[in-house]
Image (cartoon, rainbow, N blue to C red):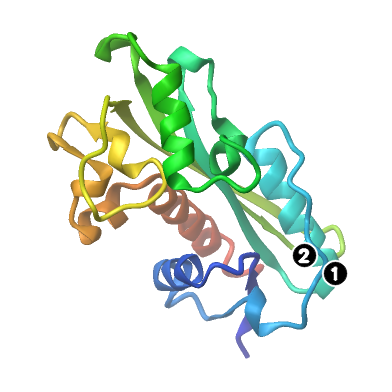
Amino acid sequence: MERKLLIASSNRGKIREIKEYLKGLELELIGLPELAPLPEVIEDGFTFRENALKKARSRAAETGITTLADDSGLEVDYLKGRPGVYSARYAGLLANDQANNDKLLGELVGVPLLKRQARFKSVLVLVEPGGGAELIAEGCCEGIIIDSPRGNNGFGYDPLFYLPEYNKTMAELPLQLKNKISHRAKALAKMKELLIDRKGEY
């Protein structure tokens, strides 16, 4: 019988992406929308790992189901790692992508391209209920923040995130390629290997 694995997200796109990466592992993968409503988890950690751990531990304890959670965002070296864990709400709790991008560009006015190194980072955490195993996998994608948005294939900071090796922003890449090189894709590949390694115990 397949073991259940809860994906601690209500984002249906993210749920589909994770299900696609982890298919074939003899797991019944379910998302939060398939369960009764649960209390919101306040993401008050100072790192992606802290937030992902909190989400995974909370949902595993509430449901009794092994849970996979992630936290991710953009780190800009010149800004000492900002926006970091505040990436989604950088310009305020109700901010949209445009407002966040505008704030980021405003903080980088006059900063030369060579000092605009940045990375997308994703941390995935799997927690078994009742004090069981905790698995952690991280993925990064390195790039540079440019002065103006390019491309329509992405969201968030993708139009500003330039990848020198492809001479394109993340938002200009074909979706199939983005899903191979993205920070979440790399973290998911590592998590899948961890799950395969533990298959006898899991």
Residue 68 image-quadrant placement = bottom right
- In the rendered image, residue 77, in percent from the top left (x then y), is placed at 45, 17
Residue shown at the point (26%, 48%) measured from the top left = 171
Q: Quadrant of the N terminus?
A: bottom right
Residue 107 image-quadrant placement = top left
Residue 95 seen in the current view: yes
Relative vertical location of residue 161 with respect to residue 76 in this rendering, above or below: below
Relative vertical location of residue 93 with respect to residue 6 in this rendering, above or below: above
For residue 59, the mark is 2
Pick the front one: 118 or 60: 118
- In the rendered image, residue 115, in percent from the top left (x then y), is placed at 33, 11
- In the rendered image, residue 53, in percent from the top left (x then y), is placed at 72, 48
**For mark 1, what is the residue?**
62
Near mark 1 (Cα within 10 A), the count class, few <14, some 14-19 or many ≥20, is few
Pick the front one: 194 or 64: 64
Residue 10 image-quadrant placement = bottom right
Residue 4 seen in the current view: no
Q: Quadrant of the C terminus?
A: bottom right
* Residue furthest bottom as drawn: 1
Residue type at mark 1 is: Glu
Residue shown at the point (35%, 20%) measured from the top left = 117
State the SS at label 2. Answer: helix
Q: Label 1 vs label 2: CA separation?
A: 5 Å
Residue type at mark 2 is: Arg
Residue shown at the point (36%, 14%) measured from the top left = 109
* Residue furthest left as drawn: 167
* 199 to the left or right of 117: right
Residue shown at the point (53%, 15%) measured from the top left = 80
Relative vertical location of residue 193 with respect to residue 129 in this rendering, above or below: above
Near mark 2 (Cα within 10 A), the count class, few <14, some 14-19 or many ≥20, is many
- In the rendered image, residue 164, in percent from the top left (x then y), is placed at 18, 29
**Tag 1–tag 2 contact (CB < 8 Å):** yes
